[in-house]
Structures are given as structure tokens and as C-alpha cells.
Image (cartoon, rainbow, N blue to C red):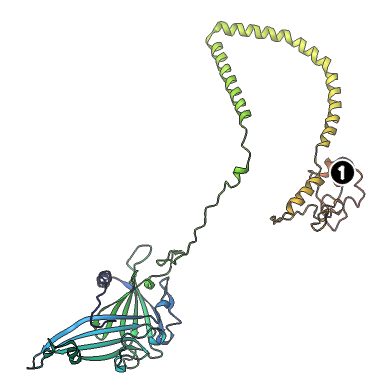
């Protein structure tokens, strides 16, 4: 770090600092509640994450980190004492290390070759006053002589020294007059004591401002309290709990993508055969034609009295003529229809059983489907008849628990089975001797 060239904080930090000062001044007249989180200086690294007002704060990344704040020239004067008069200027540096330099891996930039210009490892905030003085006679001489005549006085002061038990206090002011869903709060404020000599009286005040940048700005010194603004992303609450639910964090972790891809509900529709709508279109066309013809005939009959009379006379005469013929045909064909229905009922029922799959076959197919590698279901019905370790996995004589797929055994042919849906504690139908007829056909298909 070049001590001869002071670095000014960026304009965004200065603007944020001015906004913070105006906000704190305006809010001083409002009713506010101060919430406090207190820890000790020696326990900072273990209690760096805490909750205030339902908001989580995590400052563990700031513990041990070192920040240097440079205050430009604080005063300048000219000591006119005749020949060899001097020009003097003073500068000040602050080194802020939460937890003390002992927790930091970086070397202090405020430790030149002289050991008396640095604070010890137990100092959280170290202030270094530097006074430069140059003799007027040195102006115009060689650079080597000018550098040798440069006088520098360094004076390190430990303004926040660890006391092994001193209090470190975090405060958060909440505005009670705010009627919004989330009351306004001030930035998180850190108070650090001055050690044993100061009787734990606060010597440093740091406002942790939620900002994307990472910069520490010196605000001023009043009544022995040195005030800073630390703009850092770690000053943002990680998450807030309001009205029974958690709100989104102001700091989002990079690479955290919890968005689930939308599920494709129509997956697999491309494997289906295209539907044939030709038959449905034919029915629709037929219904439309019949409706149009019916409407045309109705309009003709309604509009012409002669057409209505002609239609009524011919329909009545045709009905009187056809009624005796239909009655005689029904009397003659009734015995023939009864005979045909008796013969065809038995033939069709026997013919249908050839193409019908029995209940036992259906249970076997269900067992084979359930035994697939990607299936997590278990087929209970007829489970004892299926052995996945045998070459011929299906064994019809092992139906320990079998429930027929008919509505009730009373609709079956032959003897009725009292054990409808047997269990391993009850003998099966085959063991009861019912496999020869009736429900026995379920076991021999």
C-alpha cells in the first residue's frame, strides 16, 4: 500500500453513506424499537451467525478479514521559525480486523520495518497517525538528500483492543410506526468496546450497510467514538420470516437453481395410433340429412292444408290395411322364433367360450406383468402360483390365495363354493374336491 497517495472511497459508497446519515437523522424522531444481539470479543468466531427481528445474519466471512481505511490530510501548517522552517501534514490510517489480527492470515499493511508502528495481535481497530515534515531547504536538492531530510512520526493507538470477555453488541432499530407488511429497519450496527482501560465503553461504531461493494468508509470521531460504514453483501439478511412464511433472501447463492423442469403430461402420446374418425363422421352426416329432410317434410305439411289432409287419409288407410296382415304373421312366426332362440342361445354360448379367456389366465397374465423389473406392485390374487425363480414360473396348483374374477360364485355353473376367495389358512378349492366341475374350470384353463 502506498502511504503517500491517499485512496478516496468510490462515489457510490459516499452517496450511500450520506443516505444512511440522512435516514438515521430523520428516523430519530420516529418511534423505534432496538433489538440487540450481544456476544463477547473472544467468542466472536463462534457466534458470528445470529437472528434479529426474524432475519438471519451471517458475518462469519468477515471475521478475520482485514480492511484499511485512509483518512486524507487532517491538518497542515507551516512552522516559520527562520532558516530551516518546515511544512507539516498529518494523515491517519485505520486498520479494522473483526476478531483481531490473530485470526487473519494477511500481514498487517501498517507494520513497516519499525516494530513500534503497529498494534498488537489483540487489537480489532488500530489507528495510526502519521506526521510528515519537510524542511524548505530540502526543496530543489537531490531526491536522495530530500528523502533523508524527510521526517515522519508514526504513532499507533489501539482504540479497540480485545479484553477477553468484553462485550460486542449488534443492534437493529425497527420502526414501529411503519404499517407496511415488513417494517423498515436500520442497517445492522456493531459496537466494539475499548478494552480493559476503557471499561468496555464503546470506542468503535460500525454500520454494516447492505451493498454489493466491499468497502469501509470513515464517518468521523465524536466523543471518543470512531464511526465507520462497512458496505458489504454480508450486511444483507439472508432470509426473513414474515406472516408465517419465509421470504426470499437478498443474497442468493450462486449456482443454486431449484427450478424443476416442467413435466410433460403428454409424454408417450406419439406412440399411440391415430384415431379413426371416419365412422363418427358418417353418423354425423346421416343425422344431419335426416334432420334436414324431417324439417322439410314438416314445413310442407304445416304450410299446406291439402297436403295434411292427403297424408292423413293415406296413412290411416295404410294402417288399417296392414294391421290384420301383421297380426297373422306374428301368430304364424311365434313358434318358429321360440325354436330358433332356444337353439341359437346354446350354440352361441358354447361358441363364445372358445374365444373367452378364463379367470385363471387373466390372473396369470397379471402375475407376469407385476413381475417386471420396473414394477413396484405386488399381485396378491394367486400369488402362491407364481415362482419367479422357476423356469416355468406359473404353477396352477399353487393358488394359495385366489379370488375369482366373477361377481359371485352363485352365478357360476355347478356346485357353489363356500370358500369364496380362500386364504392360506383355508384349504383351496382344488383341495376340497371342487375342481372337477363348476368353479374348477378356473384352475384348468
* Whether residue 213 is situated above or below residue 180 in the rendered picture: below
Marks counted in the figure total: 1
Q: Is residue 360 left or right of residue 186?
A: right
Residue 244 visible in the current orientation:
no
Q: Is residue 417 left or right of residue 81?
A: right
Q: Is residue 99 above or below residue 13?
A: below
Q: Residue 341: x and y, percent?
A: 83, 25
**Which residue: 73% across, 10% down?**
322
Closer to the camera, 155 or 370?
Answer: 155
Crowd band around label 1 with a 10 angstrom C-alpha radius: few (<14), some (14–19), many (20+) = some
- Residue 387 visible somewhere in the drawing: yes
- Front residue of 152/31: it is 152
In the rendered view of the protein, which quadrant contains the C terminus? top right
Local SS, label 1: helix
Q: Quadrant of the N terminus?
A: bottom left
When the figure is inspected, residue 320 is found, relative to residue 345, above or below; the finding is above
Q: Measured along the vertical axis of the image, is residue 240 above or below residue 162?
A: above
Residue 68 image offset from top left, x and y in percent: 31, 81
Which residue bears the numbered disc 1? 441
Quarter occupied by residue 147: bottom left
| Residue 375, quarter of the rendered image | bottom right
Q: Residue at x 33, y 65 (%)?
A: 178
Instruction: Residue 174 in the image: state x and y as whole percent.
Output: 35, 71
Q: Nearer the viewer, residue 88 or 94?
A: 88
The residue depicted at 70 percent of the width and 10 percent of the height is: 319
Image spot of residue 397 (x, y percent): 87, 52
Amino acid at each position: 500500500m502506498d502511504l503517500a497517495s491517499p485512496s478516496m472511497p468510490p462515489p457510490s459508497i459516499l452517496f450511500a453513506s450520506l443516505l444512511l446519515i440522512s435516514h438515521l437523522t430523520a428516523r430519530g424522531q420516529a418511534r423505534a424499537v432496538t433489538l440487540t444481539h450481544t456476544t463477547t470479543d473472544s467468542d466472536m468466531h463462534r457466534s458470528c451467525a445470529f437472528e434479529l427481528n426474524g432475519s438471519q445474519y451471517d458475518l462469519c466471512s468477515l471475521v478475520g478479514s482485514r480492511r484499511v481505511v485512509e483518512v486524507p490530510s487532517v491538518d497542515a501548517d507551516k512552522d516559520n521559525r527562520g532558516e530551516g522552517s518546515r511544512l507539516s501534514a498529518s494523515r491517519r490510517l485505520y486498520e479494522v480486523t473483526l476478531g483481531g489480527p490473530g485470526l487473519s492470515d494477511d500481514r498487517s499493511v501498517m507494520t513497516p520495518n519499525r516494530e513500534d508502528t503497529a498494534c498488537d495481535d489483540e487489537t480489532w481497530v488500530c489507528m495510526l497517525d502519521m506526521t510528515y515534515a519537510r524542511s524548505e531547504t530540502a526543496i530543489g536538492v537531490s531526491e536522495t538528500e530530500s528523502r533523508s531530510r524527510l521526517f515522519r512520526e508514526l504513532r499507533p493507538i489501539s482504540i479497540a483492543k480485545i479484553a477477553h470477555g468484553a462485550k460486542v453488541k449488534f443492534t437493529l432499530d425497527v420502526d414501529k410506526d411503519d404499517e407496511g407488511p415488513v417494517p423498515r429497519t436500520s442497517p445492522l450496527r456493531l459496537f466494539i468496546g475499548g478494552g480493559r482501560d476503557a471499561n468496555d465503553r464503546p470506542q468503535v461504531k460500525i454500520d454494516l450497510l447492505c451493498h454489493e461493494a466491499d468497502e469501509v468508509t470513515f464517518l468521523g470521531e465524536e466523543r471518543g467514538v470512531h464511526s465507520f460504514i462497512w458496505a458489504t453483501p454480508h450486511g444483507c439478511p439472508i432470509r426473513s420470516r414474515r406472516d408465517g412464511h419465509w421470504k426470499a433472501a437478498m443474497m442468493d447463492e450462486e449456482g443454486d437453481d431449484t427450478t424443476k423442469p416442467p413435466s410433460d403430461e403428454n409424454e408417450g402420446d406419439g406412440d399411440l395410433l391415430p384415431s379413426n374418425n371416419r365412422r363418427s363422421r358418417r353418423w354425423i352426416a346421416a343425422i344431419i340429412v335426416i334432420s334436414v329432410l324431417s324439417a322439410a317434410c314438416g314445413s310442407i305439411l304445416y304450410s299446406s292444408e291439402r297436403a295434411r289432409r292427403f297424408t292423413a287419409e293415406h296413412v290411416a288407410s295404410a294402417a288399417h290395411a296392414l294391421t290384420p296382415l301383421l297380426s297373422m304373421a306374428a301368430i304364424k312366426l311365434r313358434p318358429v322364433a321360440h325354436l330358433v332362440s332356444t337353439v341359437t342361445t346354446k350354440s352361441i354360448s358354447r361358441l363364445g367360450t372358445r374365444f373367452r379367456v378364463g379367470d385363471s389366465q387373466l390372473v396369470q397374465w397379471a402375475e407376469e406383468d407385476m413381475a417386471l423389473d420396473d414394477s413396484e406392485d405386488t399381485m396378491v390374487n394367486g400369488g402362491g402360483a407364481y415362482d419367479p425363480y422357476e423356469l416355468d414360473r406359473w404353477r396352477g396348483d399353487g393358488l394359495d390365495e385366489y379370488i375369482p374374477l366373477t361377481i359371485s360364485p352363485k352365478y357360476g355353473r355347478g356346485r357353489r363354493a363356500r370358500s369364496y376367495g380362500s386364504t392360506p389358512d383355508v384349504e383351496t378349492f382344488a383341495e376340497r374336491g371342487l375342481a372337477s366341475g363348476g368353479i374348477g374350470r378356473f384352475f384348468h384353463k
